[in-house]
Image (tube, rainbow, N blue to C red):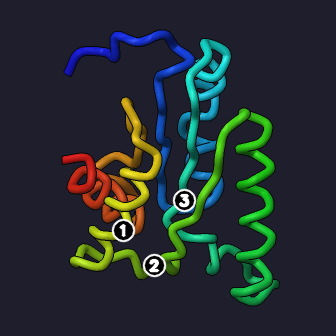
Amino acid sequence: MDAPKRPPHEVRILAIHAHPDDVEFQCAGTLGLLRQAGCRITIATMTAGDCGSAELGQEEISAVRRKEAKAAADLLGADYLCLEFKDVLIAINDDSRRRVTEAVRRARPDIILTAPPVDYMSDHEMTSRLVRDAGF
């Protein structure tokens, strides 16, 4: 696929990964450079990170991690959205494909950054497959 032939301020980037902080660990530097070049950035997480704490309950930690993800997106000048899947329950099915496809269509990206197809965690691999299907 050729790179978009538009000015950078018209190029839309979607970074979508399974959990809050996945995008930040894997491609925040790249997103920062793309934003500096003028691209429009959207960061999406499949889940709110509801299993991300041994001390806080699911609702509490989800609220904390959503807030952190939004703050990180704000630092990058990006929009943020959560698709509201549950941790360790991302699955390949029609409902999941529809939800991810809707998010991709809403963002209308020229470029999508996502999880690798083979990773250390099922949520990451399922995200990769769903994003691939949605991008198709």
Location of residue 60 in the rendering, given as x and y in whole percent from the top left corner: 79, 83
| 107 on left or right of 105 | right
**Which residue is identified by label 3?**
45
Q: Is residue 69 above or below residue 1?
A: below
Closer to the camera in the image, 53 or 60: 60
Amino acid on which the number 1 mark rests in the picture: Ser
Which element is circle 2 on? loop
Q: Residue at x 81, y 84 (%)?
A: 55
Which element is circle 1 on? helix
Disc 1 to disc 2, C-alpha distance: 7 Å
Image quadrant holding the N terminus, namely top left
Amino acid on which the number 3 mark rests in the picture: Thr
Of the image marks 1 and 2, the number of the one nearer the N terminus = 2
**Label disc, if present, on residue 88 of the rendered structure:** 2
Q: Are the residues at dot 1 and dot 2 in contact (C-beta closer than 8 Å)? A: yes
**Which residue is identified by label 1?**
122
Which element is circle 3 on? strand
